[in-house]
Image (cartoon, helix red, strand yellow):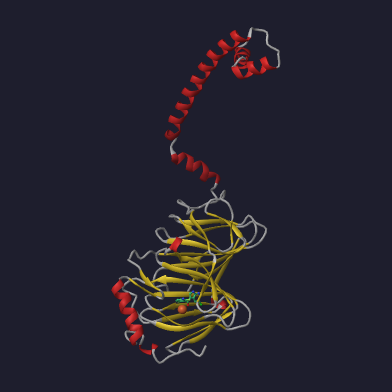
Amino acid sequence: MTTTMMRLRQHLSSRIYTSAIARIGNNRLPLQKQLRTSTARTNKLLLLLLVLLVLFLLLIPTVPPARVMSSSSSAASSVPFENPRSVVKKLLAESQPEGQGATVRRSIGRHELRNLDPFLMLDEFSVSKPAGFPDHPHRGFETVTYMLEGAFTHQDFAGHKGTIRTGDVQWMTAGRGIVHSEMPAADGVQKGLQLWINLSSKDKMIEPKYQELQSKDISRAEKDGVEVRIIAGEAFGVRSPVYTRTPTMYMDFTMRPGSQLHQPVPEGWNAFVYIIDGEGVFGRETSAPVSAHHCLVLGPGDGLSVWNKSGAPLRFALVAGQPLGEPVVQHGPFVMNTRAEIQQAMEDFYYGRNGFERAQQWSSSA
Ligand code: FJE
Ligand code: FE
């Protein structure tokens, strides 16, 4: 008899088989004896299995993780990063009322994601007349308004006035103080993204400044089915002219179905993705696709990979910034480092001082 056959016999005489055989009445040995011998065999077999399991468990951690990594990254030589960033937090931006009758989908700035240094707030706004954001102040940070659809007019207490339309961006450094209104400039729904970027303590009281880019002047690049509008920073070898006092990159990517992207993101910067349209796979090729209105916080690393495995275009913003590492004290539209500075900001706004001189006699025509 060959050993295989012997093993097979042994195996077949284990309790579950013998009892099954007993049940169908096909046994040749007396049942009692059969059970006794098979129980002893089963116990030996179980002991052997247990020993093997313990050995296996002990061996697992001794497999060097570097080898596991390299085997998967050799298959993924398409991921050109030493340390690819993965998604560490996913948040659906739900609609909430804001301003006067307006609605925003807030992601950064809600309590689940208080702030992501240097970012303080990200709102996807959707506003129709007569709703909007009438006269209000800002101090200590920058607001970046990027129009997705429609038009918005802003007007400030220093006489600055302008309208941004689909694809335009307004990069406003509030510094020591701005009072302005932001209102819809056309009929229908006006949509866009507003991002608040903190300023470092040394920059919080600088003179206010505006950088406005019309859609036609925003740098673009295209590669392998991926189009990017470069609002700040550099992608595909093309740089934006926007000056970011707090070092920031801000990209608007549109990916055709079936395309993939590998975008470097400076190591040490905090980074997130906000999905505008469609759905995509972010970070790891095997992860589940994520759909519009989700904010994805990225973990540490040197770049982000994205795959559009769907049948429709995927559009998302990729934003990253160098963390300031300073205390943040926020009271509505005033963002400073200490409570005393917030108190000061409220007094300055109330009494019209330190940058808010024109706040008292001004009101927008909107
Ligand atoms: C606001 C302070 C503000 N989200 N999204 C307090 F600055 C604002 C505000 C906005 C805003 C404006 C635009 Cl255009 C887009 C936004 C907040 O102006 F609503 C409150 N309550
Ligand atoms: Fe504002």
Q: Is residue 209 above or below residue 360?
A: above
Residue 70 position in % (x across, y down): 48, 42
Residue 335 position in % (x across, y down): 37, 73
Front residue of 186 and 259: 186
Residue 15 position in % (x across, y down): 59, 17
Residue 32 position in % (x across, y down): 60, 9
Q: Is residue 187 above or below residue 53?
A: below
Give the side of residue 83 with respect to residue 187, left or right: left
Q: Residue furthest left?
A: 340
Give the side of residue 113 with respect to residue 201, left or right: right
Residue 242 in sight in this render:
no
Q: Residue at x 55, y 44 (%)?
A: 75
Q: Residue at x 46, y 65 (%)?
A: 110
Q: Is residue 182 above or below residue 51?
A: below
Quadrant in the rendering for residue 352: bottom left
Q: Looking at the figure, which quarter contains the N terminus?
A: top right
Residue 49 in sight in this render:
yes
Label total for image: 0
Front residue of 25 and 299: 25
